[in-house]
Image (spheres, rainbow, N blue to C red):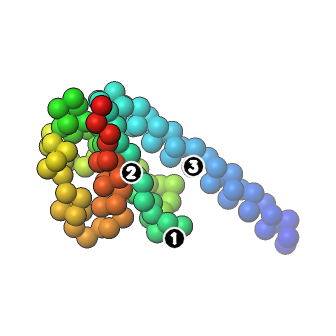
């Protein structure tokens, strides 16, 4: 009985490692593509028992959003996506509470990502 539990625990741990690696690889590929679009600001929020949110925003020399990356979830199955509503907008036009009206974690992550240093 104990050996069966240990075997299940080892299989679960290996699955977690493999799925975590797969998620990080997908995120890194998406982030690499984003970095080719201009300067990138990254914001992250979430806690231990809340969904983690990662937002990355690429802007051009005119401070307009060229591309985005958005990832939210509690598990390794969270996938990187886009925030289509802010594509092409100027940084000064963006209001996280309007873009994510009912999601304070996403608002916080977007606010952090928009704090790009000029220069």
Q: Which mark is residue 20?
A: 3
Task: Identify which residue is drawn at 22% across, 64% down.
Answer: 97
Q: Which mark is residue 49?
A: 1
Task: Identify which residue is drawn at 52% across, 43% down.
Answer: 24
Pointer 3 and pointer 1: residues touching (CB < 8 Å)? no
**Where the N terminus falls, by quadrant?**
bottom right
In this rendering, position of residue 86 left or right of residue 23: left
- Which quadrant of the figure has residue 35? top left
In this rendering, position of residue 47 left or right of residue 59: right
- Which quadrant of the figure has residue 119? top left
Few, some or many residues within 10 Å of mark 1 (<14, 14–19, 20+): few
Q: Nearer the viewer, mark 2 or mark 3?
A: 2
User: Residue 56: percent from the left, percent from the top?
Assistant: 35, 44
Q: Which mark is residue 43?
A: 2
> Does residue 70 appear in the picture of this structure?
no
In this rendering, position of residue 15 left or right of residue 38: right
User: Residue 80: percent from the left, percent from the top?
Assistant: 38, 47
Mark before the other along the chain sequence, 2 or 3: 3
Pointer 2 and pointer 1: residues touching (CB < 8 Å)? no
Q: Nearer the viewer, mark 2 or mark 1?
A: 2
Mark before the other along the chain sequence, 3 or 1: 3
User: Residue 106: percent from the left, percent from the top?
Assistant: 33, 60
């Amino acid at each position: 009985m104990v050996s069966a539990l240990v075997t299940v625990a080892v299989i679960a741990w290996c699955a977690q490692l493999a799925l975590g690696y797969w998620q990080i690889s997908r995120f890194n590929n998406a982030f690499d593509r984003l970095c080719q679009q201009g300067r990138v600001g990254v914001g992250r929020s979430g806690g231990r028992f809340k969904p983690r949110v990662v937002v990355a925003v690429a802007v051009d020399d005119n401070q307009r959003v060229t591309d985005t990356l958005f990832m939210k979830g509690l598990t390794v199955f969270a996938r990187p996506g886009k925030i289509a509503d802010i594509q092409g907008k100027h940084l000064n036009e963006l209001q996280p509470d309007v873009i994510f009206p009912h999601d304070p974690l996403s608002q916080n992550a977007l606010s952090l990502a928009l704090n790009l240093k000029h220069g």
